[in-house]
Amino acid sequence: MAQRESWATRTGFILAAVGSAVGLGNVWRFPYQVGEFGGAAFLVVYLALIAVIGFPVILVEFTVGRYTDRNPVGALKQIGTSSWQRIGWVFIVAGFVILSYYSVVAGWVLQYTVYGLQGNYAADGAAQFGATTGGMMSVLTHAIFMAAVIAVVGFGIRRGIEFSVKLMVPAIIILLVGLAVYAGTLPSAGEAYAYYLSPDLSTIAENWTSILPAAAAQAFFTLSLGMGVMITYASYLGEDRNLAKDAVIIVGLDTAIAFTVGLVAFPVLFSGDLAVADIVEIGDGPGFIFIALSQAFSNIPLGSVFGAIFFGTVTIAALSSAISIMEVVVSYLIDERGVDRVPATLLIGTAIFLFGVPVAYDGSLSWLTVYDELANNILLILGALLLSIYIGWVKTDIGLEELGKGIRNLGGWGTAWIWALRVPVVVTLVVILGLNAIGA
Ligand code: PFF
Ligand code: NA
């Protein structure tokens, strides 16, 4: 059997994980979740969950992946002898569901890049969004995006994923910072910053039963957690790196980038003649960035140029995330079923494309919501919960042993991590699943 693949460089792994984390979750999903669930109140809960839950769980995935050198299903088979093995299947199903609709939304982003290049952002953003979603055009852009995902993953870990993220991740960061500087020069930037940066926290207490699950779903989605991406990526790590340090970099960059997106979006919205009332009104649905931003870009000098750069950047960010989801499923076929990479990629890519067709074709966005809620409110939370229980309570020794490699003085930090998993993480995730079950 051929030797299993691995990252060529130390930075390759970090860039791939950052590329996975930074994507539509930061740019498309985050803003409308904020809009839907109470603005800054949501933001505060989200940030707390990133620190308290996201960070411990990313370390679980890293340690399991590096310990086993396997895809998520194989990893759990290797460390578990019982029904715990089945957790891996939750990951595979989640990957299937998420990528199928993620690619549809990425296809729209691609379409909006083209609108920008054509100088074609409409003054009526809602009408243009309605014309973009649903129907054959939307199926076509979904197909184009999936083809790109298949191409990258088909080339493998080093020549496909690592090579592409080395280009994509720096490009995303440079372009976004450039866009934030540009947005700062827009006429209403001051007003926009004041709106964006002054939280009103009074709503948390009243609405926590809806805010908490939504914020948790967003935290997992944005960090690519709960479906084995970080297990898979860490499984290609040979050397004993300090996983905690890498986790800080990855979580920190994802959060910083979500924040920077706000520094771009709000000045554009305010300067493009969108009143706060309009922003709030359209701000709570999946059409938000498409409708509001394109409409705003249509009202700003050189708006289509900057709009094309913006949506182009988002397309790249979506690609570097989508490849990570695909790699989870592909690595399963390679490791466990002995399928070669190229046929595995074509097979899975085609199946995921087909699974996404209803989402792409349906202009009402109801399929999108169904897929998104199934994946984020249930599958990601469930996957992370089971894995946290397993490592926190059952296979503690494996977690601690693996985390300790590459860290000279783990000291009490290892115990702190395990206890974070055992109680706060498990309790919070159980509560969230319960709230979702009641809400559903
Ligand atoms: N983290 C990605 C984003 O924020 O866009 C989305 C994602 C990637 C979710 C990979 C889940 C995943 F496994
Ligand atoms: Na993200």
Image (cartoon, rainbow, N blue to C red):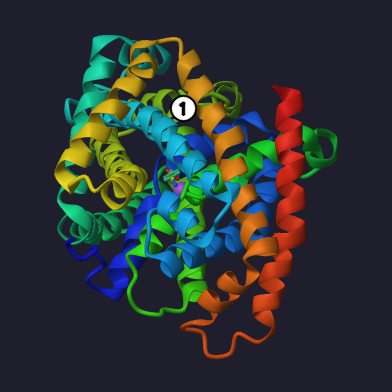
Camera-side residue of 17 and 6: 6
Residue 271 seen by the camera? no
Badge 1 element: loop
Q: Residue at x 37, y 17 (%)?
A: 129
Left or right: 262, with 234 as reference point: right
Residue 65 seen by the camera? yes
The spot of residue 281 in percent (x, y) is 59, 21
| Rendered-image quadrant of the N terminus | bottom left
Q: Residue at x 57, y 70 (%)?
A: 399
Left or right: 317, with 305 as reference point: right
Left or right: 224, with 439 as reference point: left
Q: Residues within 10 Å of mark 1 (few under 14, many from 20)?
A: some
| Rendered-image quadrant of the C terminus | top right
User: Disc 1 designates what residue?
Assistant: 273
Camera-side residue of 27 and 239: 239
Camera-side residue of 379 and 264: 379
Placement of 205 over or under 64, stated as above or below: above
